[in-house]
Amino acid sequence: MDPVAPTLSAVPGPSRRAIGVDLGGTNARVAIVDDRGQVSRLTRVRTDSRPTVVDLILDLVAEVRESGTTDLGVGVPGQVSGDGQRVMSAGFLNLAGTDLAGKLAERTGLRVVLDNDGRAALTAELAVGAASGARSCAMLTIGTGVGGAIADRGEMLTGRGNAGQLGHLTIDPRGPVCRCGRRGCLEVFASGTSLHRMACEAGLPTPVDAFALLDSAAAGESAARAVVARWAASLRAGVDIITALVDPELVLFGGGLGEAAARAVGLAPPGSSWYSTRTAPAALGDTAGVVGAALIALSA
């Protein structure tokens, strides 16, 4: 496993610590996190590096587990049951209907809580990141897919359990079919997968380095400018819809492409003054998911 430099440094403090796992469509991350959001032993591996997702999580837990650890929080793409035990939709991982928490608890002896990866990331940003002090905030996590979450007055909006599926806002009803079965979702235009597809269609080098693409566009390279314009317009459409729905003080961009997405959306102005909402990259970068997953486990 390749160690990753933690965004937050471990410091002496509270004794309560949990293991946080963030499952993405391409990468999975694990860390030990204390109840102030301080991180240690952060590690990242490819999601497809183990035969099953359960095997992957078990190996990640074994890699960082410490004596006395009792809690495990796991952020997963897609929908999670209200009790934080079962994955309800597959997302990019084949987990639909899986009693993931039960399987992990049985194999590890830990108390296990699941939550949506977008909510986990926003939980961390509210606690120790860029949303700290914000009255209302929405977050888009841009990676293999697009996740999201919304908080108001410091509380996560959950609806019947799975509010905040912002990657499935419709931005073009005649657009391509999404994995969810509907057409034109934000995810099919704004995700890293979509950015890769657009770059391929434009004859640009792949895999895509989003920052290099943005730099090429800024330098006037026509193909790069066209791709960035399409990506930025999709991101802006998502922000405008979120603003119309909940009018947050702030929309954060997180995930592996969060910082690049925050830069790109700045190139596409709001549709009108009605949709003027501050946007910013997540302060914790792509470590927000593990921090939030652990904090959710500690507070459950």
Image: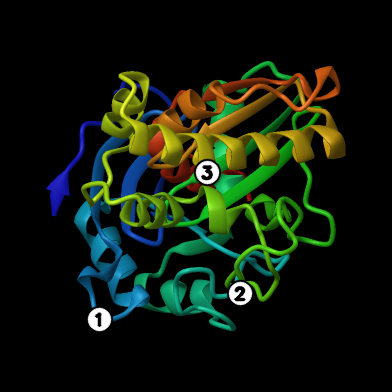
Report the quarter where the N terminus lies: bottom left
Between 134 and 256, the one nearer to me in the picture: 256
Q: Which of marks 1 and 3 is nearer the N terminus?
A: 1
For this orientation, the residue located farthest to the left is 2
The answer to whether residue 17 is visible is: no
What separation in Å lies between label 3 and label 2 (alpha carbons)?
18 Å
Please tell me whether residue 100 is drawn above or below residue 11 in the rendered image.
below
- Pinpoint residue 253: horizontal percent, then vertical percent: 53, 33
- Please tell me which residue is depicted at 30% across the width and 19% down the height of the picture: 219
The mark lying in front, picked from 1 and 3, is: 3
Q: Which mark is residue 141?
A: 3
Q: Image quadrant of residue 47?
A: bottom left
Residue where numbered disc 2 is placed: 89
- Please tell me which residue is depicted at 49% across the width and 36% down the height of the picture: 254
- Please tell me which residue is depicted at 39% across the width and 57% down the height of the picture: 197
Q: Image quadrant of residue 7?
A: top left
Between 113 and 195, the one nearer to me in the picture: 195
Residue where numbered disc 1 is placed: 51
Amino acid type of the residue tagged 1 in the rendering: Pro
